[in-house]
Image (tube, grey):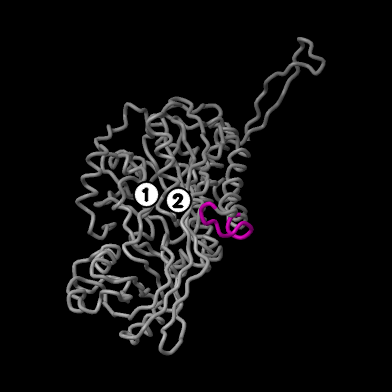
Amino acid sequence: MIRLLTHRTSPDCTNAETPLIITLSNHAYAILSNPMTSNPDWKTVDKWLMGEAFVGSRLDEHLYEICERIGSRWAGTPGDVAAARYIKGRFEEFGLSDPRLEEFELKAWDYSDCKGRIVEDDKPISLVPMIHCPPVDMTAPLVDVGFGMPHEIEACADGLPGSIAVVQNTDEPFSDRIPLPDRLRSLAEAGCLAAIAVEPTAGGHVETVRATDKRWNEKAGDVLPHPLPTVQTHREDGVRLRRAAGRTFALRIESRAFTAPCWNTVADLPGGEWPGESLVLGAHQDTYMGSPGAVDDGSGLVVLLETMRLLADARRELGIPPGMSIRFCTWSGEEQNHQGSAAYVRRHYGPEPEPRFVVNLDELSAGPMKGVVLQFPHLRGLVQTKLDEMDEGLKCHVMPMLDHTNDGFSFARSAIPYAILWRWRFVGRYADTNYRAEPWDTVDKVRTRELKEYVGFLARFLLRLSHVSPADWPPNPETVEGVEAKLQREIGNVARTM
């Protein structure tokens, strides 16, 4: 311990001074005696950040509030709004600048009923409509189209007009991969009235997917109509449907499309050296219908809140602000075509300078952290340098194709560099987290100890990046036109993410 002798004005406010002794720990003294500059004592800072990430963690508090007390957060519903208000409250609690809810118009969708049965034996089939599926009420013959590949569609072409297709929601072995939305388009062009996509995983599991490809959209966040009304069923009922090929199927969906107000949550931690420059840390606050969304994306959301707390505390308690400003954003409407992040990009970038770098957090608790993956390659050297400085053995990689499966896609379409953390998306997803669109995505699936590691890593990583002078950042060579040209070349191909 270190004792400092200083003076203070006497209590009666005279000019007399009285001694004041302040006791500091050795590491706190080291920090305060060397205020943050462009050459900080990173070893001392790292010790404080990692210690606070583990010992002072509030991850469980946030996780249970958001995923259990609030629960399902389908965009535009009261649960989603409650989550946004809770997040704003935490931004205010830790003294961020201008914490706010930013409204946008959501192209919303929900459904109240989805039923299907094989008419001849009057046995029901478990069904879930794909997001934005239109309402239908029809009776038509079932046709098993296998994987819906071109050779399979050709083989049963005469029986497809006026039918309901049963199609496997996985790739045909050994064949060139074709995205499911493209196969659904082909079925619609062949005359099918609707489709039932069969989940490949056993155990009554249904992971909600989409009948459209976000790469088809003219702009980020668009909602396109289904090629044909499409529902999903689990593997076990899929077996029954394939056996029933040629029989009649009754399908009824009550759904609606409408517009509704929705809110993103935004706040800033101002930079001490280059406040006009910024980094962004984001996560989505919404879930699928009926899901508490603990892994998707409660895990990313609470890591954002904790990273924010660490960086705000470092500024307040240790006098260490970021060099550049860091903006914290939580977006709604991610599960409905990234509408919140798309609205955010349109609102801010144009009127404001673009951020130097965006990190998007999604489904972190589905796997351990392995490194950082960039959408564009020009920051690879800078990011790897910072990872090497942290000495954790982490690597920076670059995705070979545009990843349209997370909110980062809204930034990529505006040629803004973003990254995700390298975890389950590539290898090693935990088996018990495979419930991302279901009621079983609960807090017991979240490994909070690993999330503490994510928090400490992100605080150290972002603080380092924020203290890199703008002059030392590689220029961004990407353009909107170049990104769109690349996107057009990739449509029709399954996005390669490894």
Is residue 67 one of those drawn in magenta? Answer: yes
Can residue 377 be found in the magenta stretch?
no
Q: Which residues are magenta?
A: 66-76
From the viewer's perspective, tell me whether residue 8 is left or right of residue 80.
Answer: right
Q: Secondary structure under badge 1?
A: loop
Q: Characterize the local packing of mark 2: few (<14), some (14-19) or many (20 or more) Cα atoms within 10 angstroms.
A: many
Q: Residue at x 19, y 67 (%)?
A: 176
Relative image position of residue 153 (x, y in whole percent): 21, 74
Q: Quadrant of the N terminus?
A: top right
Residue 329 as seen in the image, left or right of residue 220: right
Q: Nearer the viewer, residue 208 or 403?
A: 208
Residue 48 seen in this snapshot = no
In the figure, 344 relative to 332: above or below?
above
- What amino acid is found at the position of numbered circle 1 in the picture? Asp
Q: CA distance from mark 1 to mark 2?
A: 9 Å
Q: Nearer the viewer, residue 94 or 347?
A: 347
* SS for dot 2: strand
Q: Earlier in the sequence, mark 1 or mark 2?
A: 2
Q: Nearer the viewer, residue 188 or 347?
A: 188
Q: Name the residue carrying label 1.
A: 222
Q: Is residue 354 visible?
A: yes
**Looking at the image, which residue is at 31% across and 29% down?**
472
- The numbered disc on residue 107 is 2
Q: Is residue 24 left or right of residue 406?
A: right
User: For the residue carrying disc 1, how many other residues have a C-alpha within 10 Å: few (<14), some (14-19), or many (20+)?
Assistant: some
The percent position of residue 64, horizontal first and vertical second, equals 61, 58
- Residue sticking out furthest to the right: 12
Percent of width and height locating residue 202: 40, 78
Question: Looking at numbered disc 2 in the image, what kind of residue is underneath it?
Answer: Lys
Which residue does the image show at 41% across and 84% down from the upper left? 118
Q: How many marks?
A: 2
